[in-house]
Image (cartoon, grey):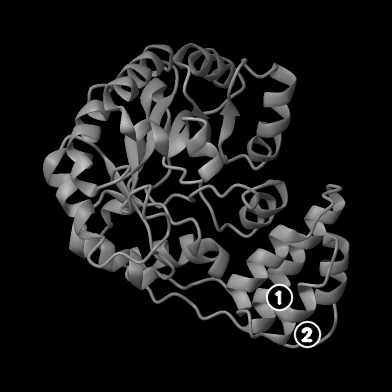
Amino acid sequence: MKATPHTAPLHPWLERLPLAGGHALPGRILPGPMEGVTGPSFCTVLTRHGLARCWITPFIRISDAVPRRARLGERLAPFLATGLPVVAQLMGTEAALLCHTAERLQAMGVVGIDLNCACPSRTVIGSGAGGAVLRTPQSLRQTLLALRRVCGGCGLSVKLRSGFDRADELPAILDAVAAASPDFVVLHYRTVRENYDAVAGGWERLARARAVAPALTLIGSGDITTAADALRMHAQTGVAGVAPARGLLHNPWLLDDIECACRGGRPALRTPQEKAGLLGEIAEAAAAAGRGGAGFLVEIARHMFGEDSPLFSALSRAATPAAVAEMLRQPSPAQ
């Protein structure tokens, strides 16, 4: 069931987000990428239902060489096949390799390049990539300046956290980022060290970031699971947009709900049957694509139905997407 919008003045998040090279994203309500989840089946099904307006890929790790064009093509193909604008997210520490990869991706049809400087994974941090680059703002500045030079034909953006160890590191980080004039910045309010821990008053950091770097187009991230959350973030911080990620696991309709709320409407409530039906479509798409494991489907089910749900308990024992799809085809799956 689609949410029903009402007539209202245009909310700023519904405005196009201009990018370099004459490109633009159709709005400022963006899907945050999730490694292992935001893949072919997830994107295909959400696009089919009109639940996204663009895609940002999960990070493409650039370590010791520029990926071959064939490998990049395989990573991009499911996203480009949706027909929506695609931003390719990169992660790495070597500016030259990142720039060469960005050039290849531009030629393949992406509208933007996003640099992941936020991932808190211990493995990633140990390699010096992801959130670890926030420890050296001047190095980040040079990397972004280099990417800006080669990204003349597409947009440039960066995903940040509010610091590595402490939030008072953020002004220096934003100063380094602003030097490259990115088209937008997605800012998750937690620091890398805070991982996904609860942080009292965390959204206040987004408001302070806007005050420190008013020239940057800041897209807020963190703790957005409902449209009401998104509107509260806008009211409290004034961010130029929002990019929920884990919230899409709870509610794959979330981006559409936020857009509806921005238009003055009331997002629809989804029944357990609707949720099971959408998850079943994702499972069927994964099975058709030959994806072997069902772990990402079980993770979605855990957020969507809750760990105490009989349906989640049943799905957690499924070994393949085909098995998940079969369970969800039953007439009345237990919720």
Q: Is residue 203 left or right of residue 273?
A: left
The amino acid on which the numbered mark 1 sits, given as a three-letter code, is Ala
Residue 39: tell me if it is visible.
yes
| Residue 203 coordinates in the image, percent (x, y) | 25, 60
- Marks 1 and 2 sit apart, C-alpha to C-alpha, by 8 Å
State whether residue 81 is above or below residue 33. Answer: above
Q: Residue at x 19, y 33 (%)?
A: 172
Q: Is residue 11 left or right of residue 64?
A: left
The amino acid on which the numbered mark 2 sits, given as a three-letter code, is Pro
Q: Residues within 10 Å of mark 2 (few under 14, many from 20)?
A: some
Q: Which residue is mark 1?
A: 276
| Residue 153 coordinates in the image, percent (x, y) | 44, 17
**Image quadrant where residue 114 sits:** top left
Q: Are marks 1 and 2 in contact (CB under 8 Å)?
A: yes
State whether residue 141 is above or below residue 228. Answer: above
Nearer to the camera, 191 or 126: 126
| Residue 197 coordinates in the image, percent (x, y) | 39, 63
Nearer to the camera, 83 or 59: 59
Please state, as top left, top right, bottom left or bottom right, where the N terminus lies in the image.
bottom right
Q: Residues within 10 Å of mark 1 (few under 14, many from 20)?
A: many
Q: Which residue is mark 2?
A: 333
Nearer to the camera, 81 or 244: 244
Residue furthest to the left: 211
